[in-house]
Image: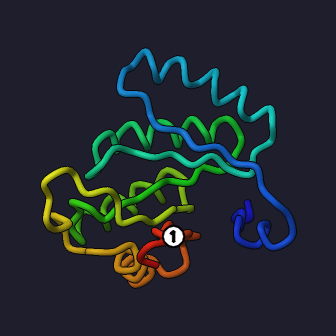
Amino acid sequence: MAKVMLSEMMKTKNLLSFEIFPPKTDKGIELLSGTIAKLCEHNPAYISVTYGSSGANVGRNMDVLKMVKQAGTEGVTHFTCIGNTKEGIKNQLQKYLDNGIDHMLALRGDLPFGWTGTGGDFRYATDLVAFARKEFGDTFEIAVAGSPEGH
């Protein structure tokens, strides 16, 4: 199956998408399946899936991305560098690929209250993108979120 290139689609038309924050409970995950099916009735180009600050709830992120793919639309994972090491990032990105997720929204991530650094190997999303490109080439289609105040 040919890879969906969202960036190419965006050149010719506006795309409908949704963003989901994974529920923290099993019951919430159970209910989300019906919600995703309803969202897919609107034919979104993709559904992006977040996770909590410093990687909290990242396991549920993968669960939800699998549900999105099973529902028949493209899944885009949010991926932060806050609190992540190079080795941890490499392993997590490989897990996404192993599960058919090859679209990423790269972010620095929100610093938890009181943090003075990133708690990881990278300070900015640009560092994360450079590392992902070095390790995986063009395997991932990567978008980057930035703050208007600093970018």
Q: In which quarter of the image is residue 62?
A: top left
Q: How many dots with numbers?
A: 1
The residue where tag 1 is placed is: 144
Q: Which quarter of the rendered picture does the N terminus lie within?
A: bottom right
Tell me the quarter of the picture where residue 28 sits.
top left
Residue 148 image position (x, y, % from top left): 50, 71
Image point 50% across, 66% down: which residue?
145
* Residue 135 relative to residue 54: left or right: right
Q: What residue type is labelled 1?
A: Val
What residue is rendered at 71% in x and 65% in y?
6
* Residue at left offset 71%, top offset 32%: 39
Residue placed farthest to the right in the image? 12
Q: Is residue 70 left or right of residue 93?
A: right
**Coordinates of residue 29 in the picture (x, y in percent):** 47, 24
Compared with 114, 140 (above or below) is: below
**Residue drawn 69% across and 28% down?**
37
Question: Where is 136 relative to 97, above or below?
Answer: below
SS of the residue under disc 1? strand
Q: Is residue 53 left or right of residue 33?
A: left
